[in-house]
Amino acid sequence: MTAVRRLSLVTDEGPALAPDRPKGALRIAIATQDMKGLNAHFGSAKLFAVYDVTPESWNFVEAVGFGDVSDESGKHKTEGDDRITPKVEALKGCHLLFCLAIGGPSAAKVVSAKIHPIKVLQPSSIEEVLSRTQTMLKTAPPPWLRKVLAEAGVSVTKPSFDDED
């Protein structure tokens, strides 16, 4: 069984559970090894940095950590253990998942949990991922993102291609 650790910011009031998603925000998870960049495959990610992103801002929600992960070849340290289901369960409530790679069975489980996986070709900083997500939200989101936004309860107007001259 894979141990799941949830790490969040602590305030003067003490530790808090993951906050409710602000209205109009997308909750995204970023596969990371070091909390600095998007630099992990889904199965081998030791951590997922979770953020709420709006067109104007982003806020750290929590880091979800896993003690026992697959290597990047898809091989488990001990065969037979399910390391994917606990990850998917821990990420429920997220709308988007950014990672370097994700296998077919894992992607199917993520999608069935209503999380849209996004494979990124090159490692990048978490700040770059957040900034690109904001840009997609500010401009005309692609159809797949409009669908995710609608499921998240965020209203988006479709771009108009009519000339207004």
Image (spheres, rainbow, N blue to C red):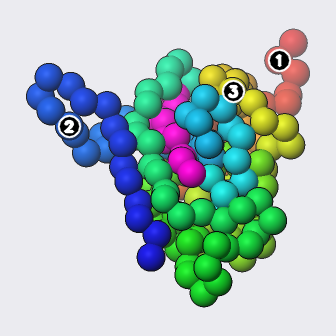
Label placed on residue 118: none
Element class at badge 1: loop
Residue that numbered label 1 is attached to? 164
Element class at badge 2: strand
Residue that numbered label 2 is attached to? 15
- Identify which residue is drawn at 81% across, 65% down: 73
- Three-letter amino acid code of the residue under disc 2: Pro
The magenta segment: 46-54
**Chain-order first, disc 3 or disc 2:** 2
Q: CA distance from mark 3 to mark 2?
A: 27 Å
Element class at badge 3: strand
- Identify which residue is drawn at 31% across, 31% down: 9
Judge left or right: residue 6 versus residue 98: left
- Three-letter amino acid code of the residue under disc 3: Ser
Residue that numbered label 3 is attached to? 125
In reply to whether residue 135 is colored magenta, the answer given is no
